[in-house]
């Protein structure tokens, strides 16, 4: 009898504990009133922040495989080494052009005999990668300085000296000329290097050695990496902020980003040390320079490709205040202001304007339709305000419709932040750029940050944000699920307050796994492939399910921003006639949710449900497991105007359902 009693007790305990493990609480009823529109959402709200940090441009998005392709690095052979085997004898050196220009040097190869193999090797950006069956386009400038019947052999070779691809150029002339060779690859491999070999006795001058996959984004010559741009395009971003970030300001003023040096022919673009080259002793990158293969024309073009508003940020005449803090005197600020005015002309000006004509010469006669311009990045103090005032006056006088983005400094709170907000509010600033790199907990507890912002004050551009999984300086801050889930929780707050928060972008965007300086980042790549982080999937779910009006989603009459671990926002998409809701459950346990629809629901359709969930908050994606955590697609049905959902623990849930007109 005793045994039966214990068995029965065991059955009861097991039965109830299984039930409670599934969903620990009874259903919470949330309400959405479909006819009560609270605010409009900016059509470009969710966008991208791009900065050339972590080898995001050179060595990343810019598909150029040769590092230091025109020998302009301060150490002219950085990235290059001499090849001389099997009795080959010769010299290599750089020589300066006689005429002053931005392309200052070229390589001279002098071969003293015809034995063995002689030339130069380039190791790319932490090596190179090739894919079987793909074509690689080599271009270079060359002129014979001495000798007859010289020729060039080019090779892509693996670590075991296996030849992946090769090509030959004969009949070189004694005039500078551009040569092009297509080299199909026989294998897929990383750890590849490139050799340019001189055959025959004599001297040859070589410059602008460039190697690209033929298969770039949109098939453009000297274009961008297709896989990386595709990941960006899939997000359907509303805007593209460029070129940063601190790179705008520079270590000092000479090191600031000057857009005029980044346009025109490649040889007219002025190489500049990347400020992240020296920034972090623990992530030193002495070979990090900006070739400007992606310059301002390409940023505008990329924005257009992505259907995103271009959002350039310019130096305000203050270098990075964490570094030199060098400041241009107000009397000398004109050049900086003129750069801003000229940039607007470059983007939007007619063909008979000087800069509009430059744009047309580069292949884009149509205007780019620039709407925004940012003045300064993470600058602070009265020195910023003084400079911003001068920019504002000049820009608005010339282009009254351009929207100016002002900075509130590097922190989302504190004395400098408050000072800038107060001063900018007095000046009726249009959009204020706020940055927050904070702990996951900060993101969860700040989901109401914008609930009490002045509805009549400046609007906000949440221009850089990311939850940092550790606050220690050196250790790798991982793109784990806790960080991404906390960002999602916070983002429901941005969406609920879309009347204040007009634009938002995660930062930084891209990182080379073997060459990064800053983590976390949204997309990681090596020379062969890329993977998206959970943070990417969160951003993508928000940007591809934005809607254009905010609705209230309430629990007991209140919005949800962390109460009992739940965060929620809802929108309506007038174009597709859909209700969209986002619910984040930060509880480790499941949660039953019932959403009651008031108003115009027609009760016919099934809804789509995108869910990202994991019990393990430390889970992250990797090359081995690129989709360890990513969205699953499910369905839900509506019964008597109610959506019943069983949310998993630690989950982001995005639902869409058709509604009546
Ligand atoms: O996103 C990385 C850096 O963080 C940006 O360059 C800067 O604006 C911020 O401090």
Image (cartoon, grey):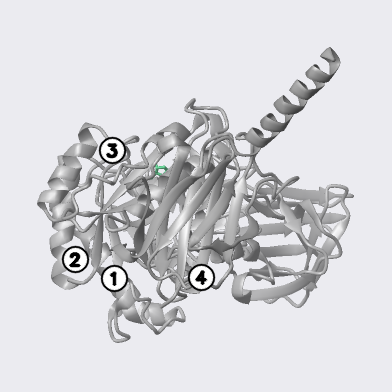
Is 5 placed left or right of 357 in the picture?
A: right
Quarter occupied by residue 448: top left
Of the image marks 3 and 4, the number of the one nearer the N terminus: 3
* Nearer to us in this view, 66 or 145: 66
Q: Nearer the viewer, mark 1 or mark 3?
A: 1
Look at 59% across and 63% down and name the residue there.
637
Is 257 placed left or right of 582 in the picture?
A: left
Name the element at disc 3: loop
Q: Nearer the viewer, mark 2 or mark 4?
A: 4
Query: Ligand 1: does it lie within 8 Å of the C-beta at label 3?
Result: no
Of the image marks 2 and 4, the number of the one nearer the N terminus: 2
Residue with the mark numbered 2? 395
Residue with the mark numbered 4? 603
Q: CA distance from mark 1 to mark 2?
A: 9 Å
Residue 148 badge? none
Of the image marks 1 and 3, the number of the one nearer the N terminus: 3
Look at 49% across and 33% down and name the residue there.
280
Of the image marks 4 and 1, the number of the one nearer the N terminus: 1
On the image, the x and y values in percent for residue 269 come to 45, 63
Q: Confirm whether residue 37 shows in the render.
A: yes
């Amino acid at each position: 009898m005793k045994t039966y009693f214990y068995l029965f007790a065991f059955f009861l305990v097991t039965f109830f504990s299984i039930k409670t493990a599934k969903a620990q609480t009874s259903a919470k009823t949330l309400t959405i009133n479909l006819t009560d529109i609270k605010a409009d959402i900016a059509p470009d709200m969710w966008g991208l922040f791009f900065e050339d940090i972590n080898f995001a441009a050179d060595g990343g998005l810019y598909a150029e495989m040769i590092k230091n392709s025109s020998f302009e690095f301060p150490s002219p052979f950085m990235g290059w080494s001499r090849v001389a085997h099997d009795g080959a004898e010769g010299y290599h050196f750089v020589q300066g052009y006689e005429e002053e220009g931005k392309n200052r040097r070229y390589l001279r190869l002098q071969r003293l005999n015809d034995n063995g193999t002689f030339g130069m090797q380039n190791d790319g950006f932490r090596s190179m990668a090739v894919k079987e069956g793909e074509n690689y386009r080599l271009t270079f400038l060359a002129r014979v300085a001495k000798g007859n019947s010289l020729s060039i052999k080019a090779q892509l070779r693996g670590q075991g000296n296996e030849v992946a691809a090769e090509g030959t150029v004969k009949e070189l002339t004694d005039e500078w000329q551009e040569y092009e060779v297509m080299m199909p690859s026989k294998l897929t491999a990383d750890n590849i290097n490139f050799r340019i070999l001189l055959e025959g006795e004599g001297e040859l001058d070589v410059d602008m050695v460039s190697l690209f996959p033929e298969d770039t984004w949109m098939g453009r010559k000297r274009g961008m990496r297709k896989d990386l741009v595709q990941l960006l395009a899939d997000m359907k971003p509303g805007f593209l902020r460029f070129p940063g970030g601190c790179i705008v300001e520079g270590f000092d003023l000479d090191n600031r980003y000057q857009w005029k040096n980044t346009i025109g022919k490649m040889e007219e673009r002025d190489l500049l040390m990347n400020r992240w080259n020296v920034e972090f002793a623990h992530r030193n990158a002495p070979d990090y320079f900006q070739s400007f293969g992606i310059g301002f024309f390409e940023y505008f073009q990329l924005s257009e490709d992505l259907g995103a508003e271009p959002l350039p940020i310019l130096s305000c005449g203050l270098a990075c205040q964490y570094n030199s803090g060098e400041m241009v005197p107000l009397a000398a600020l004109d050049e900086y202001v003129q750069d801003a005015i000229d940039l607007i002309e470059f983007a939007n000006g007619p063909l008979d304007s000087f800069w509009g004509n430059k744009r047309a010469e580069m292949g884009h006669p149509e205007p780019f339709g620039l709407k925004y311009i940012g003045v300064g990045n993470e600058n602070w103090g009265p020195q910023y305000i003084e400079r911003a005032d001068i920019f504002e006056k000049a820009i608005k006088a010339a282009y009254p419709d351009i929207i100016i983005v002002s900075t509130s400094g590097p922190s989302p709170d504190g004395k400098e932040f408050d000072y800038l907000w107060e001063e900018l509010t007095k000046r009726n600033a249009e959009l204020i750029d706020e940055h927050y790199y904070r702990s996951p907990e900060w993101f969860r507890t700040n989901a109401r940050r914008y609930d009490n912002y002045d509805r009549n004050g400046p609007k906000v551009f949440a221009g850089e944000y990311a939850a940092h999984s550790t606050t220690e300086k050196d250790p790798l801050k991982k793109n784990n699920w806790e960080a991404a889930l906390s960002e999602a929780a916070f983002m429901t707050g941005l969406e609920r307050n879309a009347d204040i928060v007009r634009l938002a972008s995660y930062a930084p965007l891209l990182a080379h796994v073997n060459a990064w300086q800053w983590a976390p980042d949204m997309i990681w790549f090596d020379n062969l492939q890329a993977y998206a982080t959970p943070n990417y999937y969160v951003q993508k779910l928000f940007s591809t399910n934005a809607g254009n009006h905010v609705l209230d989603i309430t629990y007991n009459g209140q919005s949800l921003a962390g109460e009992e671990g739940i965060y929620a926002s809802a929108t309506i998409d007038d174009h597709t006639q859909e209700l969209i809701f986002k619910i984040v459950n930060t509880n480790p346990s499941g949660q039953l949710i019932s959403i009651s629809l008031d108003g115009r629901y027609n009760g016919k359709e099934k809804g789509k449900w995108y869910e990202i969930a994991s019990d393990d908050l430390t889970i992250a994606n990797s090359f081995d497991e690129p989709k360890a955590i990513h969205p699953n697609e499910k369905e839900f049905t509506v019964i008597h105007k109610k959506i019943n959902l069983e949310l998993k623990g630690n989950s982001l849930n995005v639902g869409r359902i058709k509604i009546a007109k």
